[in-house]
Image (spheres, helix red, strand yellow):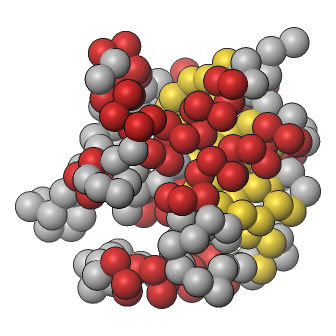
Amino acid sequence: MTKRILHIVTNVGSYDDPSHRTGLWLSELTHAWQVFAEHGFAQDVVSPAGGRSPLEPRSLKFPNYDRTAKAWRADPARMALLERTARPAQVDSSEYDAILFTGGHAVMYDFPDSVGLQQITREIFERGGIVSSVCHGYCGLLNTRLSDGSYLVAGRRLTGFSWREEVLAGVDNVLPYNAERAMRDRSADYRKSRLPFVSYTVVDGNLVTGQNPGSAKATAKKVAELL
């Protein structure tokens, strides 16, 4: 039976300052999509509110704007997937073998408190499916609780965009919170690479996480191996 992957993308297009744009970090989606496509997996896209997922401007510049991202933007059918994403209520979690939360700073705003995404994540995780995230995508796991009331991330090894990387990216003064600290506050066993911006992934059972945009392909490969 064909494996099915559910990609999660943001609906947010700016920081608190509307003139400061953000959105989906496109290569995090395209790198993972390519890996899963090579394995013949079926793939769908959902967002917290459904509808359009705007793109992070910085992800469309060198060196982040690579071949896979350019090919996606040049394909009207692929771009249409980001114009009409599904809502969580339209998703039957039992149909998916894995969920992948993509990143971009925008997800810090709409991923954490999406009750619909929390339910999908919990259901997939508790039946042994794979829950995964790349970069800021781990913000989608911050408030997800299991059926026993505990945080999904509590006591589990994971990674995501580090505070050091936020500082080096020059955005630490505009962020709504420190995601690395928030994960530690939820008793997650947060890990990170010694060097910033290099590919780094962590696997803890059926939880697979990547630290930054450069980790998207490796994270997807780990998910594919588990499937």
Q: 150 or 25, which is in the foreground?
A: 25
Give percent across and percent down for residue 193: 66, 80
x%, y% of residue 125?
81, 46
The image quadrant where one finds the N terminus is top right
Which residue is found at the position 59% from the left and 51% from the top?
A: 216
Residue sitting farthest toward the left: 19
* Residue 160, placed above or below residue 35: below
Quadrant location of residue 34? top right
Residue 84: image quadrant is top left
Q: Residue at x 34, y 78 (%)?
A: 169
> Is 6 situated above or below 210?
above
Residue 33's image quarter?
A: top right
Q: Indicate the position of residue 143 as horizontal and vertical percent values.
A: 61, 63
Viewer can see residue 7: yes
Q: Is residue 73 above or below residue 31?
A: above
Look at the image and tell me whether residue 145 can be seen.
Answer: no
Q: Is residue 167 above or below residue 40?
A: below
Q: State the quadrant of the C terminus.
A: top right
- Residue drawn 38% across the image and 28% down it: 72
Q: Residue at x 48, y 84 (%)?
A: 163
Q: Position of residue 77 (x, y in %)?
A: 37, 13
Total marks in image: 0
Q: Is residue 160 left or right of residue 205?
A: left
Relative side of 192 to 135, left or right: right
